[in-house]
């Protein structure tokens, strides 16, 4: 369970033994043991969070992966569909090392790069296909989500609205970190002058949709009641222009 993470953790302790005294080292080990059992990163100590920062190389997509493990624990959400992964498989890599089965879906997926990265790894599979929603909301068209426990996307760009609509149609939990682009409406083709108007439009798709902006300025779309929005727990609040 999380063997690579444990290995990196042991290396981290060894390389920084000059810094941690015996009590600090034991505290870090206790935090790691607790994390492996509960997958609750946010209840861990600041020193342990520093290790995660180091492990993630301060990468926002890696932080997003650790966030997801608190919002979607592996014992309840084992099959994760990640839409719009591009050529960076870091989220799938981290989740697969922590007992998740990740299915990547991207119409431009680099299959050769995927094979080079994962080989015959059975916890990560890939589908080179465009994710589409059922605009009529009949649940009979578009991407079938019945075999997945949840849907995630790290800046999925054009797929953003499709994911939201299809997850609402098929009653699937989702978390997206929304990119800074604006796109045409899937329904009527209208355009939006800025990101704020785009986010407002996304939130109005359904009363279930929440747009949450964290203290670092990142915008998330979700249908969960609340989410962890960064390495540190941020105050949850609705998008500022929505009353």
Image: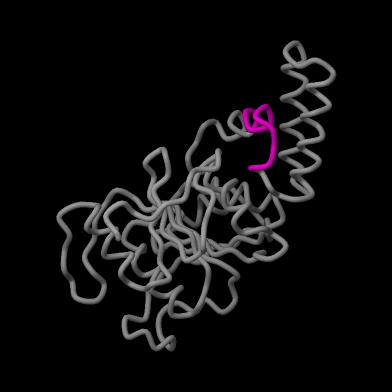
- Total labels: the figure holds 0
In the image: residue 34, left or right of residue 123: right
Front-lying residue, 47 or 1? 47
What's the image's color scheme? one colour
- Predominant secondary structure, magenta span: helix
Residue bounds of the magenta highlight: 42-51
Task: Please provide percent x and percent y for residue 124.
Answer: 62, 58
Name the quadrant of the C terminus.
bottom left
* Of 104 and 25, the residue lying toward us: 25
Residue 130 appears anywhere in the view: no
Place of residue 1 in the rendered image (x, y in percent of width and height, measured from the top left): 78, 49
Position of residue 10 measured from the top left corner of the image (x, y, whole percent): 78, 29
Observer-nearest of 181 and 242: 242
- Check the image and report above or below for 16 versus 96: above
Q: Nearer the viewer, residue 74 or 130?
A: 74
Is residue 37 shown left or right of residue 51? right
Question: Was residue 54 drawn as part of the magenta stretch in this picture?
Answer: no
Residue 139: x percent and y percent? Answer: 43, 86
User: Which residue is depicted at the point 78% across and 43% down?
Assistant: 34
Any magenta on residue 46?
Answer: yes
Q: Residue sitting at 60 percent across and 60 percent down?
A: 102
Left or right of residue 205, residue 72 in this image: right
Q: Kindly tell me whether residue 139 is visible in this rendering.
A: yes
Residue drawn 57% across the image and 48% down it: 67
In this view, the residue farthest toward the front is: 243
């Amino acid at each position: 369970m999380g063997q690579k993470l444990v290995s990196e953790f042991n290396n981290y302790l060894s390389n920084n033994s000059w810094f941690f005294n015996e009590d600090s080292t034991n505290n870090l080990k206790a935090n790691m043991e607790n994390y492996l059992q509960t997958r609750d990163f946010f209840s861990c100590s600041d020193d342990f969070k520093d290790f995660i920062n180091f492990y993630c190389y301060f990468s926002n997509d890696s932080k997003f992966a650790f966030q997801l493990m608190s919002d979607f624990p592996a014992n309840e959400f084992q099959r994760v569909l990640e839409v719009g992964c591009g050529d960076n498989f870091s989220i799938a890599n981290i989740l697969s090392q922590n007992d998740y089965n990740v299915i990547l879906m991207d119409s431009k997926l680099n299959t050769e790069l995927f094979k080079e990265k994962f080989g015959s790894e059975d916890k990560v599979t890939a589908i080179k296909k465009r994710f589409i929603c059922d605009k009529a909301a009949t649940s009979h068209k578009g991407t079938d989500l019945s075999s997945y426990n949840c849907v995630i996307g790290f800046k999925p760009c054009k797929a953003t609205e499709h994911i939201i609509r299809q997850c609402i149609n098929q009653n699937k939990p989702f978390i997206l970190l929304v990119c800074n682009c604006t796109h045409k409406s899937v329904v009527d083709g209208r355009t939006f002058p800025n990101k704020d108007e785009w986010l407002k439009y996304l939130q109005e798709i359904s009363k279930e949709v929440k747009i949450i902006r964290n203290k670092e300025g990142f915008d998330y779309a979700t249908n969960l009641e609340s989410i962890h929005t960064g390495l540190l727990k941020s105050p949850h609040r609705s998008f500022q222009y929505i009353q």
